[in-house]
Image (spheres, coloured by chain):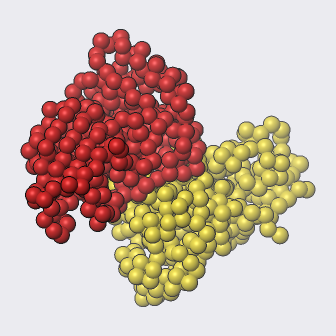
Chain colours: A yellow, B red
């Protein structure tokens, strides 16, 4: 029975200015999955460790994503999926995306790559739809393509890989409070002023430029969110203080990771990212809340096979 | 008396998705100006040919822009300005921007460059403020910096030069109807849906990426405006047909230049740009309206000294 073990990375979506369109892939934070071809047709989740998630295929994000893939694949095959969760559910660093992207990537690999990365994004989005009611691509795209990605358009889907300056390092704090993606979405107003929108797309242009030109200062100046962050940050304890100390310690920028509650800070260089982590840790230790802190380079490859 | 003669180029602002932030500089369409240092302090517009514009310094965009510059300059000097307009006022290809940007660029040159290009953008914006009531930078920035430019932020002002793929050619039609910038602004709603805004900033990210990676197809896909164009295009006769034939003839994209009424079509290569011009001409000839058509490469240098 053909099988592979993969690393399915965590991802940081939105990146302040790029709500629903920008994301990037982490290197040292992620799940492991074992995906096997089976002679018995259908998709089966055979094992989940590290999280209390449904084994039933249609209720599992990896299950529905692989089912979407098989619907486009000629030939009746079977898939068995084992999931070893390390990314906590509801953390805002792409836990569901890692599972759905990882599963379709692995199946595509086992089948000798019948589908493009772009097509895999579409399949994985079915998992996101199950997880949050919204088929967004800003986590599954960076998980599948690696590095920084842009969802230029959702209809038709148009996903583009950007350039990754090599010195960028993410510090992420995950406060262990529950903020459901659906709740985080409900605090967002569906209308914005044109002025805010202009401000935001100026920053999207600036961030993309900064990535391509490796202009770290410009990346920092562009990591600004005048629309979503003011609404969502009220759901995250100590957000303002975390941002303040991160910037004070030299982070280029700091914002909400995806729909939160995780907070990311992007720095130039590992030393700065570590100092930022220390300062954030100090802020959060005082709250008495449980939290995890991750420090990770940007993973330019995305999902990969491991032993 | 130290004097220079300059070419002050026309510019195309907004570029569909980048309302108020993106613009690019034309190569073969522009005004000429002669700027002289004088021993008599103050700013004087001594001659205007080709347009019925005020000679009074405080009512002339070049005059107020140079006055803004001199306010920041130590030492009492005099400036005399001759303007030979070739860009028609109210055309939507940066007529006022050419005058104000040209004047401050030339004065800075005559004074041995005391000011940065960034600072010159600020001074030239005073001219824009006089012309339209709004100190926008999306025409003066490309006139001063050349190529494609992004206004990442207005407060504080942050203007960035992007990359220009060498095969891009603009076709611009200027229907000779009057659409005042202030009128073109008044049809715009001040609120947009978050969904529209996301669509737009996805395209800004796509266009900037396409410019840096010289991906002409991506540039074309990103030249889309779901917010301003639907509102403003009703002011421009035959807009839909012009866009239709331009795309049919191979243009990458087509939209309103600045606040209109000019329409731009961006193509890969001079041959396509010429075919697009022919097709647009055919559409407009039937209207009985007067019009000009320009075909121009992108001018990567901006304002320049001529003999």
Most foreground residue, B36 or B281: B36
Q: Quadrant of residue A237?
A: bottom left
Image point (54%, 45%), residue name: B165
Taking the image as shown, residue A154 lies to the left or right of residue A28, namely left
Say if A278 sits above or below B68 in the image: below
Quadrant into which the C terminus of chain A falls = bottom right
Image point (79%, 47%), residue name: A113
Q: Is residue B145 visible?
A: yes
Say if A261 sits above or below B63 in the image: below
Residue B239 at x, y percent in the picture: 36, 24
Residue B202 at x, y percent in the picture: 47, 48
Most foreground residue, B261 or A99: B261
Image point (21%, 40%), residue name: B83
Taking the image as shown, residue B112 lies to the left or right of residue A181, namely left
Residue A220 at x, y percent in the picture: 44, 68
Residue B56 at x, y percent in the picture: 8, 44
Say if B236 sits above or below B85 in the image: above
Q: Quadrant of residue B85?
A: top left
Residue lying at the far front of the rendered structure: B1
Most foreground residue, A220 or B274: B274
Q: Is residue B244 visible?
A: no
Quadrant into which the N terminus of chain A falls = bottom right
Image point (18%, 47%), residue name: B81
């Amino acid at each position: 029975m053909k099988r592979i073990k993969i690393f399915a990375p965590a991802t940081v979506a939105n990146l302040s200015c790029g709500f629903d369109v920008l994301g990037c892939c982490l290197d040292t934070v992620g799940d492991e999955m074992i995906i096997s071809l089976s002679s018995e047709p259908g998709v089966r989740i055979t094992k989940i460790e590290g999280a209390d998630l449904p084994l039933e295929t249609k209720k599992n994000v990896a299950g529905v994503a692989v089912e979407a893939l098989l619907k486009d694949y000629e030939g009746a095959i079977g898939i068995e999926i084992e999931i070893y969760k390390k990314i906590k559910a509801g953390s805002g660093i792409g836990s569901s995306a890692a599972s759905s992207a990882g599963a379709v990537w692995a199946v595509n690999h086992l089948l000798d790559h019948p589908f493009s990365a772009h097509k895999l994004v579409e399949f994985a989005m079915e998992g996101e739809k199950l997880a949050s009611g919204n088929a967004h691509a800003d986590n599954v795209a960076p998980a599948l393509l690696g590095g920084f990605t842009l969802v230029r358009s959702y209809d038709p889907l148009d996903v583009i890989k950007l350039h990754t300056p090599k010195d960028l390092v993410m510090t992420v704090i995950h406060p262990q409070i529950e903020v459901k993606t659906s709740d985080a979405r409900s605090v967002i107003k569906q209308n914005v002023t044109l002025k805010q929108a202009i401000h935001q797309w100026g920053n999207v242009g600036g961030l993309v430029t900064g990535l391509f030109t490796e202009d770290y200062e410009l990346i920092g100046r562009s990591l600004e969110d005048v629309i979503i962050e003011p609404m969502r940050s009220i759901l995250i304890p100590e957000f303002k203080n975390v941002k303040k100390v991160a910037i004070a310690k030299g982070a280029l920028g700091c914002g909400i990771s995806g729909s939160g509650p995780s907070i990311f800070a992007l720095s130039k260089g590992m030393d700065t990212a570590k100092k930022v982590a220390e300062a954030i840790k100090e802020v959060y230790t005082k709250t008495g809340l449980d939290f995890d802190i991750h420090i990770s380079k940007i993973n330019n490859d995305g999902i990969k096979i491991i032993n």
